[in-house]
Image (spheres, rainbow, N blue to C red):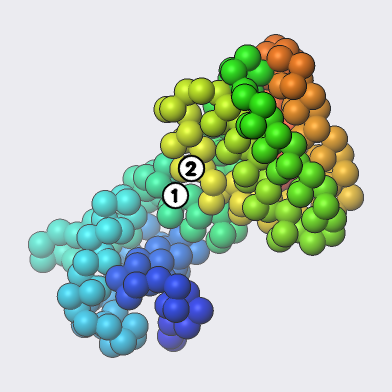
Amino acid sequence: MSITTSRRRARRGIHGQIVEEVGNRIARGDWEPGEQLPDESVFGTELDVSRTVVREAMKVLSEKGMIESRPRIGTRVTSSNSWNHLDPDVLKWVFANKPTKKNAYDLFELRRMIEPAAAKLAANRISDDELAALRQAYQEMVDAGDDFEKGIEPDLRYHHIILLASGNQMLVPLGNTIESALAASFRISSSAPNERLESHKRHEAVISAIAAHDGRLAAEAMLYLIDRSQELILSIID
């Protein structure tokens, strides 16, 4: 079975393509934890790449905690408990391949630790330009209407602006880390289009609180937004 995806290969270097292909397959469950992966020559033939490229890709996946290699044993898939779930690629692959309720719980717990606090800080520190950018992102979400894919980018930007406006430089990289998982979770929620209007209202409530420089209300509004999003995602995931 070929796992070559020409569209991805056009966008990524050959090394990154192999990491993407194999990482996706591991996250999808093509191999069980503890199962041995094909050797480099088999992968090289299947993927039409050199053994050197396969070897380098395996090193990357090992650094992400998804595989482990031992002499005379070979390369085996690790338990998901060993994966680096703060790695953007790992998050992307997990949420693109039938995430579990545990995956969703973990993501939303992390969001609750970060985003309400960021919204509270933003209410006190946001600049006029940042507030204008936040409102613009929100308006683009609304203007996207039923084009859900079009609405994902401004939704991500909305959350990113709040992290920036918090003024805490350590919060921004955390937002970048979970961005792929957020995008995937937004796609999951697209199966409930009737929820979109209510979601927009919740996003607007956060902006209103931040614009009023009410940190407590901004944190509460963001927490409510996250809690309702979690309820929706968990009702959809099997």
- Secondary structure under badge 2? helix
Residue 29: % across, % down: 47, 63
Residue 164: % across, % down: 54, 31
| Residue 166 marker | none
Residue 222 sits in quarter = top right
Residue 60 sits in quarter = bottom left
- Secondary structure under badge 1? helix
158 lies above or below 36: above
- Give yes or no for contact between labels 1 and 2 (Cβ–Cβ under 8 Å): yes
Q: Write the residue at 82% across / 40% down.
A: 200
Q: Write the residue at 62% across / 24% down.
A: 127
Residue 40: % across, % down: 22, 77
Q: Nearer the viewer, residue 71 or 99?
A: 99
| Residue 31 visible here | no
Residue at label 2?
176
Residue at label 1?
88
Disc 1/disc 2 C-alpha distance (Å): 8 Å
Q: Write the residue at 40% across / 47% down.
A: 87
Amino acid residing under circle 1:
Pro
Residue 136: % across, % down: 73, 42
The tally of labels here is: 2
**190 relative to 13 in the view: left or right:** right
**44 relative to 229 in the view: left or right:** left
20 lies above or below 237: below
| Residue 47 visible here | yes
Nearer to us: label 1 or label 2: 2
